[in-house]
Image (spheres, rainbow, N blue to C red):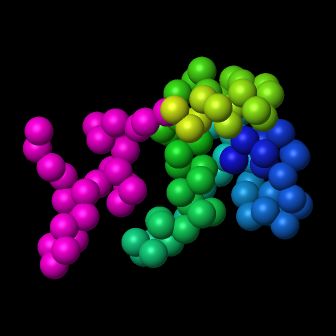
């Protein structure tokens, strides 16, 4: 999403996303999806993470290498992220929350 926003990624990838440069806080528009499969797509999930989950201090980084370094260290909390990547998978049960 960083490369799309900065227009340094491949055009083919940039064309997947709609960028609204007038809204700096939430520059990506999510497509309208009705099914779970659509919500797991890159076109939907990428804008959701950037617009809603990523902290402002990561969004305001200007240099690619600095962004890469800091995004690798960022760990979303289960309170803010409900995606399958942040939930625990139990064979035969599916994705679930664990209680610490």
Instruction: State which quadrant residue 15 falls in.
Output: bottom right
Q: Residue at x 83, y 39 (%)?
A: 6
User: In the figure, is residue 23 to the left or right of 36?
Assistant: right
Q: Say which of 15 and 33 sits in front.
A: 15
Q: Say which of 33 and 50 sits in front.
A: 50
Q: Residue at x 48, y 66 (%)?
A: 40
- Residue 24 horizontal/vertical position (percent): 71, 30
Q: In the displayed orientation, state which residue is furthest to the left.
A: 99
Quick check: is 98 in the magenta stretch? yes
Is 43 rendered above or below residue 49?
below
Q: Give the residues in magenta.
A: 74-100
Q: Is residue 31 visible?
A: no
- Residue 65 horizontal/vertical position (percent): 76, 32
- Residue 99 horizontal/vertical position (percent): 11, 44
Q: Is residue 3 visible?
A: yes
Quick check: is 9 in the magenta stretch? no
User: In the figure, is residue 70 to the left or right of 34?
Assistant: right
Is 90 rendered above or below residue 10?
below
Is 39 rendered above or below residue 25?
below
Q: Say which of 42 and 99 sits in front.
A: 99
**Picture mark count:** 0
- Residue 34 horizontal/vertical position (percent): 45, 72
Q: Residue at x 50, y 72 (%)?
A: 38
Q: Residue at x 80, y 28 (%)?
A: 63
Instruction: State which quadrant residue 42 falls in.
Output: bottom right
Q: Quadrant of the C terminus?
A: top left
Instruction: Identify the main secondary structure in magenta.
Output: loop
User: In the figure, is residue 11 to the left or right of 41?
Assistant: right
User: In the figure, is residue 99 to the left or right of 20?
Assistant: left
């Amino acid at each position: 999403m960083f490369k799309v926003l900065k227009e340094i990624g491949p055009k083919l990838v940039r064309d997947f996303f709609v960028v609204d440069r007038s809204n700096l806080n939430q520059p990506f528009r999510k497509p309208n999806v009705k099914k779970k499969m659509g919500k797991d797509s890159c076109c939907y999930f990428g804008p959701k993470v950037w617009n809603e989950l990523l902290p402002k201090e990561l969004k305001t980084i200007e240099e690619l290498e600095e962004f890469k370094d800091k995004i690798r260290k960022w760990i979303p909390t289960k309170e803010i992220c409900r995606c399958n990547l942040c939930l625990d998978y139990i064979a035969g049960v599916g994705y679930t929350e664990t209680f610490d």
